[in-house]
Image (cartoon, rainbow, N blue to C red):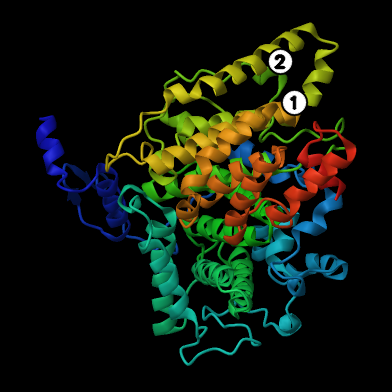
Amino acid sequence: MSDELSQSLGRRTAVSLLADIDAACERSIESALIKGPFGVFQSVQESSPAVTVELSPDTNTDNTFTSMYPETDGFVEEIQRSDWPDQLPGDDMDIFTASLDPNFGLNEEDHESMPNFFMDDPSGAEGLAFFSPGFISQVIGPPEPEAEDLDPAPVTDIIQLPKDIPPSSSGLPEETEQLLRHYRQSMAGRSSMQAKRKSPWEIIFLPCALETFAELSLWNEASHTRSSIFYTLLAHSALQLHMTQSGSHWKEVGLKNHERAQSHLRQALQHEMFGPRQASYKELLMAILAMAMTSLHNGTRAFRVFLLDAERLIRLRGLANQNPFKTRLLHHMYTHLRVISESMSIALPDPSENKIEVSRTFRITEEGLNMGLDPALEKTDEIGFNDIHLEVQGRWNQTLYPVIYGIPESLMTLLSQTVSLANEKARLESAARCNPAISEALAKHTKTLENRIWAWPTTLPTETTSDDNLVTHPQVRSMTLAIHQALVIYFYRRVYDMNAMILQDMVRKTLDYLEPHLSELIDEQDFATSLAWPAFVAGCEAVAPDLQERALKCLGVTDEKGVYFTERPAGVVVPLIWERRRETGDWTMSWQSLVMEG
Protein backbone atom coordinates (compact mmCIF):
# COMPACT_ATOMS: atom_id res chain seq x y z
CA MET A 1 0.00 0.00 0.00
CA SER A 2 2.89 2.38 0.81
CA ASP A 3 4.47 1.72 -2.60
CA GLU A 4 1.17 2.52 -4.33
CA LEU A 5 0.83 5.76 -2.41
CA SER A 6 4.39 6.75 -3.25
CA GLN A 7 3.88 5.98 -6.93
CA SER A 8 0.65 7.97 -7.01
CA LEU A 9 2.64 11.10 -6.17
CA GLY A 10 4.36 10.90 -9.54
CA ARG A 11 7.20 13.42 -9.72
CA ARG A 12 5.53 15.72 -7.21
CA THR A 13 6.10 15.97 -3.47
CA ALA A 14 3.36 15.53 -0.89
CA VAL A 15 3.79 19.14 0.26
CA SER A 16 3.37 20.53 -3.26
CA LEU A 17 0.20 18.49 -3.84
CA LEU A 18 -1.27 19.69 -0.56
CA ALA A 19 -0.41 23.26 -1.56
CA ASP A 20 -2.28 22.76 -4.85
CA ILE A 21 -5.32 21.45 -2.99
CA ASP A 22 -5.21 24.37 -0.58
CA ALA A 23 -5.04 26.86 -3.44
CA ALA A 24 -7.82 25.10 -5.37
CA CYS A 25 -10.11 25.10 -2.33
CA GLU A 26 -9.94 28.89 -2.18
CA ARG A 27 -11.30 29.16 -5.73
CA SER A 28 -13.52 26.10 -6.12
CA ILE A 29 -17.01 25.33 -4.90
CA GLU A 30 -16.95 21.74 -6.14
CA SER A 31 -18.01 18.98 -3.79
CA ALA A 32 -14.65 17.20 -3.95
CA LEU A 33 -11.06 17.78 -5.06
CA ILE A 34 -8.48 15.05 -5.65
CA LYS A 35 -4.73 15.43 -6.23
CA GLY A 36 -2.71 12.22 -6.31
CA PRO A 37 -3.41 10.24 -3.13
CA PHE A 38 -4.95 13.26 -1.39
CA GLY A 39 -8.47 14.58 -1.56
CA VAL A 40 -10.93 16.87 0.18
CA PHE A 41 -14.70 17.07 0.19
CA GLN A 42 -17.30 19.52 1.45
CA SER A 43 -18.94 17.98 4.51
CA VAL A 44 -21.36 20.82 5.31
CA GLN A 45 -23.84 22.31 2.87
CA GLU A 46 -23.30 26.05 2.92
CA SER A 47 -26.25 28.39 3.00
CA SER A 48 -26.67 30.97 0.29
CA PRO A 49 -24.11 33.67 0.91
CA ALA A 50 -25.22 37.19 1.57
CA VAL A 51 -24.47 39.77 -1.09
CA THR A 52 -21.21 41.52 -0.32
CA VAL A 53 -19.01 43.95 -2.18
CA GLU A 54 -15.54 42.66 -2.95
CA LEU A 55 -12.77 44.64 -4.61
CA SER A 56 -10.59 41.64 -5.47
CA PRO A 57 -10.65 37.86 -5.37
CA ASP A 58 -10.14 36.62 -1.83
CA THR A 59 -10.68 40.11 -0.45
CA ASN A 60 -13.47 39.11 1.92
CA THR A 61 -12.80 35.44 2.47
CA ASP A 62 -11.95 35.89 6.13
CA ASN A 63 -14.58 37.40 8.35
CA THR A 64 -13.05 36.16 11.57
CA PHE A 65 -13.58 38.49 14.49
CA THR A 66 -12.82 38.06 18.13
CA SER A 67 -16.42 37.92 19.29
CA MET A 68 -16.84 34.67 17.36
CA TYR A 69 -14.31 33.05 19.67
CA PRO A 70 -15.29 33.86 23.26
CA GLU A 71 -12.48 31.73 24.65
CA THR A 72 -9.96 34.21 23.23
CA ASP A 73 -11.72 37.41 24.26
CA GLY A 74 -9.77 37.80 27.48
CA PHE A 75 -6.46 37.44 25.73
CA VAL A 76 -7.45 39.82 22.95
CA GLU A 77 -8.49 42.38 25.54
CA GLU A 78 -5.08 42.01 27.14
CA ILE A 79 -3.43 42.64 23.79
CA GLN A 80 -5.53 45.71 23.13
CA ARG A 81 -4.78 47.22 26.54
CA SER A 82 -1.12 46.27 26.81
CA ASP A 83 1.30 49.17 27.17
CA TRP A 84 3.70 49.40 24.26
CA PRO A 85 6.44 51.39 26.06
CA ASP A 86 7.71 48.17 27.65
CA GLN A 87 8.71 47.00 24.18
CA LEU A 88 9.20 50.31 22.41
CA PRO A 89 10.59 52.95 24.81
CA GLY A 90 8.88 56.28 24.39
CA ASP A 91 12.15 58.18 24.22
CA ASP A 92 13.09 56.25 21.12
CA MET A 93 9.72 56.42 19.41
CA ASP A 94 10.93 58.98 16.88
CA ILE A 95 13.35 56.48 15.38
CA PHE A 96 10.46 54.27 14.33
CA THR A 97 8.78 57.04 12.37
CA ALA A 98 11.65 57.46 9.92
CA SER A 99 10.84 56.41 6.39
CA LEU A 100 13.34 54.82 4.03
CA ASP A 101 14.45 58.30 3.09
CA PRO A 102 14.77 61.37 5.38
CA ASN A 103 12.59 63.35 2.99
CA PHE A 104 9.67 61.10 3.91
CA GLY A 105 10.12 61.37 7.66
CA LEU A 106 7.87 62.93 10.28
CA ASN A 107 8.46 65.85 12.57
CA GLU A 108 7.05 66.58 16.00
CA GLU A 109 4.27 68.73 14.61
CA ASP A 110 3.09 65.81 12.47
CA HIS A 111 2.93 63.61 15.55
CA GLU A 112 0.75 66.11 17.38
CA SER A 113 -1.72 66.32 14.51
CA MET A 114 -2.00 62.60 13.91
CA PRO A 115 -4.79 61.83 16.44
CA ASN A 116 -7.10 64.14 14.48
CA PHE A 117 -6.39 62.35 11.21
CA PHE A 118 -9.16 59.77 11.76
CA MET A 119 -11.80 61.91 13.48
CA ASP A 120 -13.96 61.90 10.35
CA ASP A 121 -13.77 58.12 10.04
CA PRO A 122 -14.52 56.24 13.27
CA SER A 123 -14.21 52.90 11.49
CA GLY A 124 -10.68 53.78 10.45
CA ALA A 125 -9.80 54.68 14.02
CA GLU A 126 -11.29 51.38 15.18
CA GLY A 127 -9.04 49.45 12.83
CA LEU A 128 -5.93 51.31 13.88
CA ALA A 129 -6.72 51.00 17.59
CA PHE A 130 -5.28 47.50 17.54
CA PHE A 131 -1.83 48.67 16.45
CA SER A 132 1.09 50.26 18.28
CA PRO A 133 1.86 54.00 18.17
CA GLY A 134 5.13 53.29 16.39
CA PHE A 135 3.36 51.25 13.73
CA ILE A 136 0.75 53.94 13.15
CA SER A 137 3.42 56.62 12.86
CA GLN A 138 5.43 54.49 10.47
CA VAL A 139 2.49 53.68 8.21
CA ILE A 140 0.35 56.77 8.44
CA GLY A 141 3.01 59.35 7.73
CA PRO A 142 2.18 63.03 7.65
CA PRO A 143 -1.37 64.06 6.71
CA GLU A 144 -1.79 64.43 2.99
CA PRO A 145 -2.12 68.05 1.77
CA GLU A 146 -5.58 67.48 0.41
CA ALA A 147 -6.82 65.72 3.57
CA GLU A 148 -8.92 68.71 4.70
CA ASP A 149 -10.89 68.64 1.45
CA LEU A 150 -11.83 64.98 1.69
CA ASP A 151 -15.49 64.20 1.26
CA PRO A 152 -16.74 62.51 4.44
CA ALA A 153 -18.64 60.07 2.21
CA PRO A 154 -17.16 56.59 1.87
CA VAL A 155 -13.90 56.58 -0.05
CA THR A 156 -14.12 55.40 -3.67
CA ASP A 157 -12.86 51.93 -4.51
CA ILE A 158 -10.70 53.20 -7.36
CA ILE A 159 -7.04 53.51 -6.40
CA GLN A 160 -5.46 56.83 -7.34
CA LEU A 161 -1.69 57.20 -7.56
CA PRO A 162 0.06 60.07 -5.75
CA LYS A 163 -0.17 63.28 -7.74
CA ASP A 164 3.57 63.98 -7.75
CA ILE A 165 4.39 60.73 -9.58
CA PRO A 166 3.67 60.77 -13.32
CA PRO A 167 1.54 57.72 -14.12
CA SER A 168 1.72 55.75 -17.33
CA SER A 169 -1.24 55.50 -19.69
CA SER A 170 -2.54 52.52 -17.72
CA GLY A 171 -2.34 54.37 -14.41
CA LEU A 172 0.66 52.33 -13.24
CA PRO A 173 4.31 53.34 -12.79
CA GLU A 174 6.10 53.03 -16.11
CA GLU A 175 8.71 50.68 -14.60
CA THR A 176 6.08 48.20 -13.37
CA GLU A 177 6.58 45.48 -15.97
CA GLN A 178 10.36 45.69 -15.75
CA LEU A 179 10.32 45.48 -11.96
CA LEU A 180 7.93 42.52 -11.89
CA ARG A 181 9.97 40.77 -14.55
CA HIS A 182 13.17 41.32 -12.57
CA TYR A 183 11.53 40.07 -9.40
CA ARG A 184 10.30 36.94 -11.14
CA GLN A 185 13.61 36.28 -12.87
CA SER A 186 15.56 36.75 -9.65
CA MET A 187 13.57 33.87 -8.16
CA ALA A 188 13.64 31.71 -11.30
CA GLY A 189 17.40 32.04 -11.60
CA ARG A 190 18.08 30.55 -8.21
CA SER A 191 20.31 27.67 -7.24
CA SER A 192 19.68 23.94 -7.53
CA MET A 193 17.53 24.09 -4.38
CA GLN A 194 14.62 25.72 -6.23
CA ALA A 195 12.58 22.52 -6.55
CA LYS A 196 13.01 21.65 -2.87
CA ARG A 197 11.78 24.91 -1.42
CA LYS A 198 8.40 26.42 -0.62
CA SER A 199 9.06 30.13 -0.60
CA PRO A 200 6.21 32.39 0.59
CA TRP A 201 7.45 35.03 -1.84
CA GLU A 202 6.97 32.71 -4.80
CA ILE A 203 3.86 30.85 -3.63
CA ILE A 204 1.90 33.77 -2.13
CA PHE A 205 3.37 37.23 -2.67
CA LEU A 206 4.29 37.13 -6.35
CA PRO A 207 0.95 35.62 -7.53
CA CYS A 208 -0.91 38.26 -5.51
CA ALA A 209 1.20 41.02 -7.06
CA LEU A 210 0.58 39.68 -10.57
CA GLU A 211 -3.17 39.43 -9.94
CA THR A 212 -3.20 42.99 -8.62
CA PHE A 213 -1.20 44.13 -11.65
CA ALA A 214 -3.89 42.63 -13.88
CA GLU A 215 -6.69 44.28 -11.87
CA LEU A 216 -5.04 47.70 -12.01
CA SER A 217 -4.19 47.32 -15.70
CA LEU A 218 -7.66 46.20 -16.78
CA TRP A 219 -9.96 48.01 -14.36
CA ASN A 220 -7.73 50.52 -12.58
CA GLU A 221 -8.98 49.29 -9.22
CA ALA A 222 -7.92 46.88 -6.51
CA SER A 223 -8.23 46.68 -2.76
CA HIS A 224 -5.86 48.86 -0.76
CA THR A 225 -4.47 45.78 0.96
CA ARG A 226 -3.52 44.09 -2.30
CA SER A 227 -2.24 47.37 -3.71
CA SER A 228 0.05 47.74 -0.71
CA ILE A 229 1.49 44.26 -1.37
CA PHE A 230 1.90 45.09 -5.06
CA TYR A 231 3.77 48.35 -4.55
CA THR A 232 5.90 46.86 -1.77
CA LEU A 233 7.16 44.19 -4.16
CA LEU A 234 7.89 46.88 -6.76
CA ALA A 235 9.83 48.81 -4.12
CA HIS A 236 11.77 45.72 -3.09
CA SER A 237 12.66 44.90 -6.69
CA ALA A 238 13.78 48.48 -7.39
CA LEU A 239 15.91 48.65 -4.24
CA GLN A 240 17.55 45.35 -5.16
CA LEU A 241 18.39 46.80 -8.59
CA HIS A 242 19.83 49.86 -6.86
CA MET A 243 22.12 47.60 -4.81
CA THR A 244 23.58 46.11 -7.99
CA GLN A 245 23.60 49.28 -10.11
CA SER A 246 25.13 52.10 -8.09
CA GLY A 247 24.35 55.58 -9.31
CA SER A 248 21.16 54.43 -10.98
CA HIS A 249 17.70 55.92 -10.58
CA TRP A 250 16.35 52.74 -8.98
CA LYS A 251 16.68 54.04 -5.43
CA GLU A 252 14.29 56.89 -6.20
CA VAL A 253 11.91 54.46 -7.89
CA GLY A 254 12.07 52.15 -4.89
CA LEU A 255 11.39 54.94 -2.41
CA LYS A 256 8.42 56.22 -4.40
CA ASN A 257 6.88 52.77 -4.58
CA HIS A 258 7.54 52.31 -0.88
CA GLU A 259 5.62 55.55 -0.26
CA ARG A 260 2.76 54.27 -2.42
CA ALA A 261 2.69 51.04 -0.43
CA GLN A 262 2.57 52.98 2.84
CA SER A 263 -0.30 55.09 1.55
CA HIS A 264 -2.33 52.03 0.59
CA LEU A 265 -1.58 50.27 3.86
CA ARG A 266 -2.86 53.37 5.66
CA GLN A 267 -6.09 53.20 3.67
CA ALA A 268 -6.37 49.46 4.27
CA LEU A 269 -6.13 49.91 8.02
CA GLN A 270 -8.75 52.65 7.90
CA HIS A 271 -11.28 51.03 5.59
CA GLU A 272 -10.53 47.31 5.20
CA MET A 273 -9.93 46.08 8.73
CA PHE A 274 -13.65 45.63 9.46
CA GLY A 275 -17.01 45.97 7.78
CA PRO A 276 -18.25 44.95 4.33
CA ARG A 277 -14.90 45.81 2.72
CA GLN A 278 -12.90 43.80 5.23
CA ALA A 279 -9.75 42.38 3.65
CA SER A 280 -8.78 38.79 4.23
CA TYR A 281 -6.59 38.06 7.21
CA LYS A 282 -4.01 36.45 4.94
CA GLU A 283 -3.64 39.53 2.74
CA LEU A 284 -3.45 41.95 5.68
CA LEU A 285 -0.66 39.86 7.18
CA MET A 286 1.05 39.72 3.79
CA ALA A 287 0.94 43.52 3.52
CA ILE A 288 2.51 44.04 6.95
CA LEU A 289 5.22 41.40 6.47
CA ALA A 290 6.10 42.68 3.01
CA MET A 291 6.40 46.22 4.37
CA ALA A 292 8.62 44.90 7.17
CA MET A 293 11.03 43.26 4.74
CA THR A 294 11.26 46.36 2.55
CA SER A 295 11.87 48.53 5.62
CA LEU A 296 14.85 46.32 6.47
CA HIS A 297 16.74 48.19 3.75
CA ASN A 298 16.89 51.06 6.25
CA GLY A 299 17.84 49.06 9.35
CA THR A 300 16.00 47.03 11.93
CA ARG A 301 14.04 49.66 13.88
CA ALA A 302 11.07 50.06 11.53
CA PHE A 303 11.42 46.37 10.67
CA ARG A 304 10.69 45.45 14.29
CA VAL A 305 7.71 47.81 14.53
CA PHE A 306 5.94 46.04 11.68
CA LEU A 307 6.70 42.64 13.20
CA LEU A 308 5.28 43.70 16.57
CA ASP A 309 2.01 44.54 14.91
CA ALA A 310 2.06 41.47 12.73
CA GLU A 311 1.98 39.64 16.08
CA ARG A 312 -1.08 41.60 17.13
CA LEU A 313 -2.88 40.73 13.91
CA ILE A 314 -1.95 37.05 14.25
CA ARG A 315 -3.20 36.86 17.83
CA LEU A 316 -6.40 38.72 17.03
CA ARG A 317 -7.41 36.94 13.83
CA GLY A 318 -4.94 34.20 12.97
CA LEU A 319 -4.73 31.66 15.77
CA ALA A 320 -8.46 30.86 15.70
CA ASN A 321 -8.29 29.79 12.05
CA GLN A 322 -7.76 26.21 10.92
CA ASN A 323 -4.32 27.24 9.64
CA PRO A 324 -4.54 26.49 5.91
CA PHE A 325 -1.24 25.92 4.16
CA LYS A 326 -0.66 29.49 2.93
CA THR A 327 -1.56 30.98 6.30
CA ARG A 328 0.91 28.64 7.96
CA LEU A 329 3.59 29.74 5.50
CA LEU A 330 3.03 33.33 6.58
CA HIS A 331 3.06 32.40 10.27
CA HIS A 332 6.39 30.62 9.83
CA MET A 333 7.73 33.62 7.96
CA TYR A 334 6.66 35.91 10.80
CA THR A 335 8.19 33.60 13.42
CA HIS A 336 11.55 33.41 11.67
CA LEU A 337 11.82 37.15 11.13
CA ARG A 338 10.62 37.95 14.66
CA VAL A 339 13.08 35.62 16.41
CA ILE A 340 15.99 37.11 14.47
CA SER A 341 14.71 40.64 15.07
CA GLU A 342 14.41 40.09 18.82
CA SER A 343 17.90 38.62 19.02
CA MET A 344 19.23 41.86 17.55
CA SER A 345 16.96 44.16 19.56
CA ILE A 346 18.61 46.40 22.13
CA ALA A 347 16.66 45.99 25.38
CA LEU A 348 16.71 49.32 27.18
CA PRO A 349 16.21 49.36 30.96
CA ASP A 350 12.73 50.48 31.94
CA PRO A 351 12.87 53.09 34.72
CA SER A 352 9.29 52.24 35.68
CA GLU A 353 9.88 48.50 35.74
CA ASN A 354 8.12 48.13 39.08
CA LYS A 355 5.00 49.83 37.82
CA ILE A 356 4.64 48.46 34.32
CA GLU A 357 4.20 44.78 33.69
CA VAL A 358 7.07 43.27 31.78
CA SER A 359 6.30 42.32 28.19
CA ARG A 360 5.12 38.75 27.87
CA THR A 361 7.05 38.06 24.67
CA PHE A 362 10.65 36.87 24.51
CA ARG A 363 11.00 36.95 28.27
CA ILE A 364 10.95 34.21 30.85
CA THR A 365 9.32 34.40 34.27
CA GLU A 366 10.24 32.62 37.47
CA GLU A 367 7.38 30.20 36.88
CA GLY A 368 8.66 29.43 33.37
CA LEU A 369 12.12 28.31 34.44
CA ASN A 370 12.97 24.73 33.41
CA MET A 371 9.81 24.45 31.32
CA GLY A 372 9.76 23.73 27.58
CA LEU A 373 13.34 22.40 27.52
CA ASP A 374 12.67 18.79 26.48
CA PRO A 375 13.69 18.23 22.82
CA ALA A 376 12.12 14.76 22.87
CA LEU A 377 8.63 16.16 23.50
CA GLU A 378 6.08 15.41 20.81
CA LYS A 379 4.37 18.77 20.29
CA THR A 380 0.65 18.60 19.65
CA ASP A 381 -0.88 20.60 16.82
CA GLU A 382 -2.42 22.96 19.36
CA ILE A 383 1.01 23.75 20.79
CA GLY A 384 2.67 23.85 17.39
CA PHE A 385 0.16 26.17 15.74
CA ASN A 386 0.08 28.58 18.69
CA ASP A 387 3.79 28.62 19.58
CA ILE A 388 4.52 31.49 17.22
CA HIS A 389 7.62 32.53 19.18
CA LEU A 390 9.08 29.02 19.58
CA GLU A 391 8.97 29.00 23.37
CA VAL A 392 8.72 25.20 23.67
CA GLN A 393 11.26 22.64 22.51
CA GLY A 394 10.04 19.43 20.93
CA ARG A 395 9.28 17.68 17.66
CA TRP A 396 6.33 18.82 15.55
CA ASN A 397 5.65 16.99 12.33
CA GLN A 398 3.57 19.87 10.92
CA THR A 399 6.41 22.41 10.94
CA LEU A 400 7.21 24.08 7.62
CA TYR A 401 10.59 25.39 8.72
CA PRO A 402 12.59 22.79 6.76
CA VAL A 403 10.80 23.41 3.44
CA ILE A 404 10.89 27.23 3.72
CA TYR A 405 14.24 27.97 5.32
CA GLY A 406 16.04 24.63 5.33
CA ILE A 407 16.63 25.09 9.06
CA PRO A 408 15.29 22.69 11.68
CA GLU A 409 12.76 24.43 13.89
CA SER A 410 14.62 23.09 16.94
CA LEU A 411 17.61 25.35 16.22
CA MET A 412 15.51 28.51 16.05
CA THR A 413 13.72 27.41 19.23
CA LEU A 414 17.08 27.35 21.03
CA LEU A 415 17.78 30.87 19.77
CA SER A 416 14.37 32.08 20.93
CA GLN A 417 14.86 30.56 24.38
CA THR A 418 18.33 32.11 24.63
CA VAL A 419 16.91 35.54 23.80
CA SER A 420 14.18 35.13 26.45
CA LEU A 421 16.73 34.10 29.10
CA ALA A 422 19.16 36.89 28.22
CA ASN A 423 16.42 39.53 28.34
CA GLU A 424 15.45 38.52 31.89
CA LYS A 425 18.84 37.43 33.25
CA ALA A 426 19.52 40.59 35.27
CA ARG A 427 16.04 40.65 36.80
CA LEU A 428 16.08 36.94 37.64
CA GLU A 429 19.54 37.19 39.19
CA SER A 430 18.32 40.07 41.34
CA ALA A 431 15.33 38.01 42.50
CA ALA A 432 17.58 34.99 43.10
CA ARG A 433 19.63 36.88 45.68
CA CYS A 434 16.68 36.84 48.04
CA ASN A 435 15.14 33.54 47.00
CA PRO A 436 17.21 30.33 47.03
CA ALA A 437 14.54 28.47 45.06
CA ILE A 438 14.77 30.95 42.17
CA SER A 439 18.56 30.82 42.34
CA GLU A 440 18.57 27.04 42.01
CA ALA A 441 15.96 27.03 39.25
CA LEU A 442 17.79 29.73 37.27
CA ALA A 443 21.11 27.90 37.48
CA LYS A 444 19.49 24.65 36.37
CA HIS A 445 17.60 26.31 33.50
CA THR A 446 20.74 28.04 32.22
CA LYS A 447 22.85 24.88 32.37
CA THR A 448 20.15 22.78 30.70
CA LEU A 449 19.76 25.27 27.85
CA GLU A 450 23.54 25.40 27.43
CA ASN A 451 23.71 21.60 27.20
CA ARG A 452 20.86 21.53 24.68
CA ILE A 453 22.72 24.00 22.46
CA TRP A 454 25.94 21.98 22.53
CA ALA A 455 24.13 18.71 21.87
CA TRP A 456 22.02 20.06 19.01
CA PRO A 457 24.35 19.15 16.07
CA THR A 458 23.88 15.46 16.90
CA THR A 459 20.20 15.84 15.92
CA LEU A 460 21.02 17.23 12.46
CA PRO A 461 20.53 14.71 9.63
CA THR A 462 23.66 13.69 7.75
CA GLU A 463 24.54 15.48 4.53
CA THR A 464 22.93 14.06 1.38
CA THR A 465 22.15 15.18 -2.15
CA SER A 466 18.56 13.98 -1.94
CA ASP A 467 16.08 15.99 -3.99
CA ASP A 468 13.40 15.85 -1.32
CA ASN A 469 15.24 17.16 1.75
CA LEU A 470 16.37 20.76 1.84
CA VAL A 471 17.84 20.42 5.34
CA THR A 472 20.50 17.94 4.21
CA HIS A 473 21.53 19.90 1.10
CA PRO A 474 25.29 20.63 1.48
CA GLN A 475 24.96 24.41 1.09
CA VAL A 476 21.97 24.71 3.40
CA ARG A 477 23.55 22.40 5.95
CA SER A 478 26.64 24.61 5.98
CA MET A 479 24.44 27.67 6.58
CA THR A 480 22.64 25.87 9.41
CA LEU A 481 25.91 24.93 11.11
CA ALA A 482 27.05 28.56 10.80
CA ILE A 483 23.86 29.63 12.60
CA HIS A 484 24.53 27.05 15.31
CA GLN A 485 28.09 28.27 15.89
CA ALA A 486 26.82 31.86 16.00
CA LEU A 487 24.20 30.75 18.54
CA VAL A 488 26.98 29.38 20.76
CA ILE A 489 28.75 32.75 20.53
CA TYR A 490 25.50 34.59 21.20
CA PHE A 491 24.71 32.44 24.25
CA TYR A 492 28.07 32.96 25.92
CA ARG A 493 28.17 36.69 25.22
CA ARG A 494 24.62 37.48 26.30
CA VAL A 495 24.04 34.95 29.07
CA TYR A 496 27.53 34.52 30.56
CA ASP A 497 29.03 37.85 29.36
CA MET A 498 32.16 35.95 28.33
CA ASN A 499 35.28 37.72 27.08
CA ALA A 500 35.35 37.79 23.28
CA MET A 501 38.96 36.57 23.31
CA ILE A 502 37.76 33.15 24.50
CA LEU A 503 35.31 32.81 21.61
CA GLN A 504 37.72 33.15 18.68
CA ASP A 505 37.63 29.48 17.76
CA MET A 506 33.84 29.66 17.48
CA VAL A 507 34.13 32.82 15.36
CA ARG A 508 36.51 30.97 13.06
CA LYS A 509 34.16 27.99 12.73
CA THR A 510 31.21 30.27 11.95
CA LEU A 511 33.13 31.93 9.12
CA ASP A 512 34.38 28.55 7.87
CA TYR A 513 30.80 27.38 7.46
CA LEU A 514 29.55 30.70 6.09
CA GLU A 515 32.11 31.73 3.49
CA PRO A 516 31.95 28.91 0.89
CA HIS A 517 28.28 29.38 -0.02
CA LEU A 518 27.45 32.92 1.12
CA SER A 519 27.61 34.60 -2.28
CA GLU A 520 25.27 32.07 -3.86
CA LEU A 521 22.77 31.68 -1.04
CA ILE A 522 22.42 35.41 -0.34
CA ASP A 523 20.39 35.75 -3.56
CA GLU A 524 17.73 33.49 -2.04
CA GLN A 525 15.36 35.98 -0.45
CA ASP A 526 14.29 33.58 2.30
CA PHE A 527 17.92 32.87 3.23
CA ALA A 528 19.14 36.48 3.41
CA THR A 529 18.35 37.12 7.09
CA SER A 530 19.52 33.62 8.03
CA LEU A 531 22.92 34.42 6.53
CA ALA A 532 23.21 38.00 7.76
CA TRP A 533 22.59 36.98 11.38
CA PRO A 534 25.61 34.67 11.89
CA ALA A 535 27.80 37.04 9.86
CA PHE A 536 26.96 39.91 12.20
CA VAL A 537 27.26 37.89 15.44
CA ALA A 538 30.63 36.43 14.44
CA GLY A 539 31.85 39.75 13.08
CA CYS A 540 31.11 41.61 16.30
CA GLU A 541 33.19 39.16 18.35
CA ALA A 542 36.13 38.79 15.93
CA VAL A 543 39.39 39.90 17.56
CA ALA A 544 42.22 38.48 15.46
CA PRO A 545 43.04 40.65 12.39
CA ASP A 546 42.60 37.74 9.98
CA LEU A 547 39.16 36.93 11.40
CA GLN A 548 38.15 40.58 11.25
CA GLU A 549 39.16 40.76 7.60
CA ARG A 550 37.17 37.63 6.77
CA ALA A 551 34.17 38.90 8.72
CA LEU A 552 34.20 42.22 6.86
CA LYS A 553 34.05 40.40 3.53
CA CYS A 554 31.01 38.44 4.68
CA LEU A 555 29.32 41.57 5.99
CA GLY A 556 30.02 43.30 2.68
CA VAL A 557 28.04 40.59 0.89
CA THR A 558 25.03 40.88 3.22
CA ASP A 559 25.15 44.69 3.24
CA GLU A 560 25.01 44.75 -0.56
CA LYS A 561 21.65 42.99 -0.30
CA GLY A 562 20.38 45.62 2.13
CA VAL A 563 20.10 43.15 5.02
CA TYR A 564 21.59 44.46 8.25
CA PHE A 565 20.34 44.79 11.82
CA THR A 566 21.70 48.21 12.79
CA GLU A 567 20.84 51.74 11.71
CA ARG A 568 23.88 51.78 9.43
CA PRO A 569 25.32 48.93 7.36
CA ALA A 570 27.02 46.26 9.46
CA GLY A 571 30.27 46.80 7.57
CA VAL A 572 30.35 50.31 9.05
CA VAL A 573 29.13 49.53 12.56
CA VAL A 574 31.22 46.44 13.34
CA PRO A 575 34.65 48.12 12.84
CA LEU A 576 33.51 50.88 15.20
CA ILE A 577 32.77 48.20 17.80
CA TRP A 578 36.26 46.75 17.37
CA GLU A 579 37.85 50.19 17.68
CA ARG A 580 35.91 51.00 20.84
CA ARG A 581 37.01 47.75 22.48
CA ARG A 582 40.64 48.43 21.55
CA GLU A 583 40.43 51.92 23.02
CA THR A 584 38.99 50.72 26.33
CA GLY A 585 40.80 47.39 26.48
CA ASP A 586 37.51 45.83 27.58
CA TRP A 587 36.79 42.80 25.40
CA THR A 588 33.74 41.89 27.46
CA MET A 589 31.96 45.05 26.28
CA SER A 590 28.87 43.99 24.33
CA TRP A 591 28.00 45.30 20.91
CA GLN A 592 24.56 46.28 22.27
CA SER A 593 26.07 48.67 24.81
CA LEU A 594 28.40 50.14 22.20
CA VAL A 595 25.55 50.75 19.75
CA MET A 596 23.53 52.39 22.54
CA GLU A 597 26.44 54.73 23.22
CA GLY A 598 26.30 55.78 19.58
Res 584 visible: yes
Res 52 visible: no
Query: Would you say 301 lies left or right of 162 here?
Result: right
- For label 2, the crowd category at 10 Å Cα-Cα, with few meaning under 14, some 14 to 19 and many 20 or more, is many
In this rendering, the answer to whether 271 lies above or below 134 is below
Q: Which residue is mark 2?
A: 442
Place of residue 57 in the rendered image (x, y in percent of width and height, measured from the top left) = 39, 67
Rendered residue at 27%/56% (across/down): 24
Look at the numbered disc 1 and give the secondary structure of its residue.
loop
Specify the farthest residue to the front: 546
Q: Which residue is mark 1?
A: 498
- Name the amino acid, label 1: Met
Rendered residue at 31%/55% (across/down): 23
Number of on-image labels: 2
| Foreground: disc 1 or disc 2 | 1
Rendered residue at 58%/54% (across/down): 558
Task: State the residue in front, 593 or 216.
Answer: 593
- What is the C-alpha distance between the residues marked 1 and 2? 18 Å
Looking at marks 1 and 2 on the same chain, the residue that comes earlier in the sequence is marked by 2
Rendered residue at 63%/61% (across/down): 297
Question: Quarter holding the N terminus?
Answer: top left
Task: State the residue in front, 309 or 169.
Answer: 169
